[in-house]
Amino acid sequence: MRPIYLLPLLPPLLSASPTPVTKWFNPLEVTNITCNDPADFEGHADIYGDFQYKNALYLCNYEWHGLTMDPSSKPLYQRESPYGVSYDYSISWVEGCETTVPSQDVQVPLNDQAPGWSCHAIFSTLYKGCINGGIGGYLIAGCLRYQFDGGLG
């Protein structure tokens, strides 16, 4: 006969219930730019517009060309660090955001509604549209958040 072992009953593991995601609707249009605060980038190196422009052009037209994003997509991120200066580019679906389409093309996030707002044009705007020494910021196109951070460690 095999021995029977009685195990004490353990209380169920306590787990924090996930915070509910607030759903919100954003039409297929571009928000205002939110520029990075220079105080958060204190002592950053010089950011060169020519490099920022060419790198954004390469990322958007080659690395990320043909990609679409939806609420389940993982963020896209690329860091280039010429001469030890960081140029960080990212695109992500804003959590809880809903728009008029189920997914968005990374290259042309607003479809044909606003052809001037291409991926490359957005990253260029994040550099040129902020008067903060080239450290950039972010904007939202539909439900896609495009962010450029220049000069972070």
Image: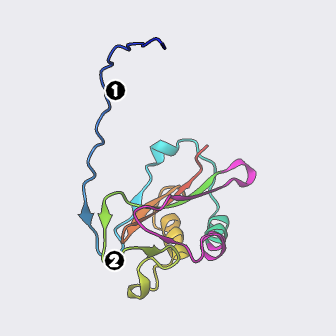
**Disc 1 designates what residue?**
13
The answer to whether 19 appears left or right of 150 in the picture is: left
* Mark 2 surroundings within 10 Å by alpha-carbon count, few (fewer than 14), some (14 through 19), many (20 or more): many
Residue 56 position in % (x across, y down):
61, 69
Please state the extent of the stretch shown in magenta in the rendering: 57-85
* Mark 1 surroundings within 10 Å by alpha-carbon count, few (fewer than 14), some (14 through 19), many (20 or more): few
In contact (CB < 8 Å): disc 1 and disc 2: no
| Residue occupying the point 66% across, 67% down | 55
Alpha carbons under labels 1 and 2: distance apart: 43 Å
**Disc 2 designates what residue?**
28
Secondary structure of the residue carrying tag 2 is: loop
| Residue occupying the point 46% across, 67% down | 129
- Where is 14 relative to 55, above or below? above
Residue 63 position in % (x across, y down):
65, 69
Residue placed farthest to the bottom in the image?
Answer: 112
Residue 40 position in % (x across, y down):
47, 43
